[in-house]
Image (tube, grey):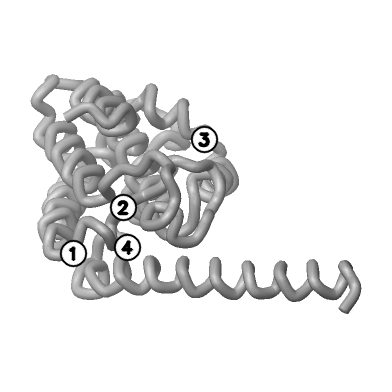
Amino acid sequence: MDIASTLLIAAAAWLALRMRYQRTRITLLGRHLAGLQLERGMETLTQGYTRAIHEASEARQIQVLESFAQAERTVAAQAQSLADAMQQESGQATRMSLLPFCVPYAERFLPVPTRDFRALLRIHAAGLRHVVDNESRLDPKDRAYHLSAELYLLQHSCHWYCKSRSVADARLALRHQVRHQQALDAVSDVTRSAYLRWLRGAG
């Protein structure tokens, strides 16, 4: 067998292994999302906030933003439900590699830095609740701005867990024209400080 054939077989085996690994993670997260309307609620809010921004008058913008109060509370509650449900999973199943690309089962067999997705979901749930409850007394437009960032960062974390950090970065930029650092800068101080501690592996 020549070198080209060997490399082709190795690449095919690698792709199959990566696909199986990612499918397992997608299935695990999907099982916990199945009974929730979290994804639909997040889409409703992100699209609604964008629509509000394009309203002609500020009064109309605020009126539209305030119409999402119930949807915001529902999304915050469902994010907490997801975080609670994921606590049932093992630490091995919820470890995330900090490598930018997907190396199947790296968190099990390679000496690479990892973090716990369960802890990250708790951070997102607490951050969403903080902004939804408006503990910082933000005006409606600033509150919607921070909530959008909270939702973008939560989506990024889910894509990172299921695929890889680089895929999560690309999807965030493609779907929302937002870089990861921009989303992190725009979330509440509560979320940002906890997220950065998680990223450093502190606490």
Mark 1: which secondary structure? loop
Q: Is residue 172 above or below residue 77?
A: above
Quadrant position of the C terminus in the picture:
top left
Q: Which is more N-terminal, label 4 or label 1?
A: 4
Q: Look at label 2 and name its amino acid.
A: Arg
Q: Is residue 123 left or right of residue 167?
A: left
How far across and how far down the image is residue 91, in percent? Answer: 21, 56
Residue identified by numbered label 3: 178
Q: Which is more N-terminal, label 2 or label 1?
A: 1
Residue identified by numbered label 4: 40
Mark 2–mark 3 distance (CA, rounded to whole Å): 26 Å
Q: Nearer the viewer, mark 2 or mark 3?
A: 2
Mark 3–mark 4 distance (CA, rounded to whole Å): 20 Å
Q: Which is more N-terminal, label 4 or label 3?
A: 4
Q: Quadrant of residue 12?
A: bottom right
Q: Determine if residue 90 is in view.
A: yes
Mark 4: which secondary structure? helix
Answer whether labels 4 and 2 touch (C-beta < 8 Å).
Answer: no
Q: Is residue 118 left or right of residue 182?
A: left
Mark 4–mark 2 distance (CA, rounded to whole Å): 26 Å
Mark 1–mark 4 distance (CA, rounded to whole Å): 24 Å
Residue identified by numbered label 2: 95
Q: How dense is the environment of label 2, judged by Cα within 10 Å: few (below 14), some, or many (20 and up)?
A: many
Q: Look at label 4 and name its amino acid.
A: Arg
Q: How dense is the environment of label 3, judged by Cα within 10 Å: few (below 14), some, or many (20 and up)?
A: some
Task: Identify which residue is drawn at 71% across, 70% down.
Answer: 10
Mark 3–mark 1 distance (CA, rounded to whole Å): 31 Å
Which label was assigned to residue 166? none
Residue at far front of view: 1
Q: Which is more N-terminal, label 1 or label 3?
A: 1
Task: Identify which residue is drawn at 25% across, 26% down.
Answer: 197
